[in-house]
Amino acid sequence: MTNILFAAGPDRWAVYEAPLRAALDGFGLDYALRCEAEPETVDYIVYAPDSEVRDFTPYTRLKAVLNLWAGVERITGNKTLTVPLARMVDEEGLTQGMLEYVTGHVLRHHLGMDRYIMNPDHRWDPVVPPLASERPVTVLGLGTLGTACAGALAGLGFPVSGWSRTPREVEGITCHHGPDGLTKALAGAEILVLLLPDTPATQDLMNRETLALLPRGACIVNPGRGPLIDDAALVEALDQGQVGHATLDVFRREPLPQDHPFWAHPGVTITPHVAADTRVPSASRVIAENIRRGEAGEPLLHLVDRAAGY
């Protein structure tokens, strides 16, 4: 029998138990799924980084840890975790949610919708936006989410550039990499989308120097990770008109403190980390598939590169 520990908190257990059992049953696995178990009996841990499980040493039979979140920065540095770690890549739910968020807010900024939505003076102000083909967009991060969003935006007619730390090729996207590539990617970005992981190499990537590389008045959409942006530098760039607007879904501290300057700034739209929440039914199927693979001796999906941090 395969023993599975759900170590992602009692609230999530209440919503995940039935979908996980249904997904596991679909593979005909002989399993026991529990939210409490003796460590030495556990084969797989379904995990969230806010779990009470911090020391993996007692889990002597453990084969893999399967993260419920796409972000793994809070667990990759755990030296007691020596078995494979898989992050959540849910194209059915998480990826689709991110794609909808990004395309919606890029179109909002492209069309200048705020001008009409927030119009208390009832001004008749007919400003015709350019066509998508005349609005360059850059996506920083060409992983699963970034590639999907870049492709969708290109499909709408936007000229899309993408940037990654290492070389990538994505059909229909002008790809850049490395420090020199970042400069080129930012220089043409009238709308910038941030979909990078949170690693030491990406923290404060958007700072006073890099924000200055953007075309004046550029818009930023960040549904990736809060630490990608230097908060103070962004407020300064907004005040100076270098950045026209920033739509932010993720922050260094969440919930965002009530006294944070983002709340009161007219150039900032705040959404409460809703861009790409994990969808329980589809995420359960991703977890079950990896357990099936593990038991069949097949390679696990979405394994984390500990050195890279994602």
Image (tube, helix red, strand yellow):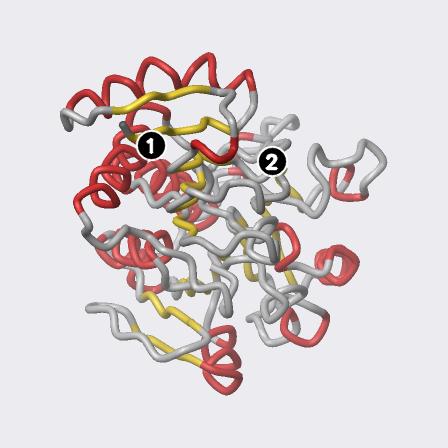
Residue beneath the point at 36% across and 52% down: 145
Residue type, mark 2 in image: Val
Task: Describe the element under mark 2 as helix, strand or loop.
Answer: loop
**Is residue 192 something one can see in this rendering?**
no
Q: Residues within 10 Å of mark 2 (few under 14, many from 20)?
A: few
Front residue of this view, candidates 291 and 222: 291
| Image coords of residue 94 (percent x, y) | 36, 38
Q: Where 180 sits versus 236, above or below?
A: below
Q: Position of residue 20 (x, y in %)?
A: 32, 22
Q: Earlier in the sequence, mark 1 or mark 2?
A: 2
Q: Is residue 118 left or right of residue 147?
A: right
Q: Residue extending furthest bottom?
A: 180
Specify few, some or many for label 1: CA neighbours under 10 Å numbering under 14, 14-19, or 20 or more: many
The residue drawn where x is 70% and y is 47% is 252
Judged from the image, the secondary structure of the residue bearing numbered disc 1 is helix
Say whether residue 137 is left or right of residue 172. Answer: right
242 or 258: nearer the viewer: 258
Q: Residue at x 38, y 16 (%)?
A: 17
Rendered view: 125 above or below 221:
above
**Residue 48 appears at what percent x and percent y?**
52, 36
Residue under pointer 2: 53
Q: Residue at x 15, y 28 (%)?
A: 27
Which image quarter: residue 228?
A: bottom right
Instruction: Kindly indicate the quadrant of the structure image that contains residue 175.
Output: bottom left
Is residue 155 depicted above or below 54 in this figure?
below
Residue 122, x across and y down, in percent: 59, 27
Q: Is residue 303 visible?
A: yes
Residue type beneath disc 1:
Ala
In space, the residues marked 1 and 2 are separated at their CA atoms by: 21 Å
Which quarter of the picture shows residue 200? Answer: bottom right
Q: Which residue is mark 1?
A: 283
Q: Quadrant of the N terminus?
A: top left
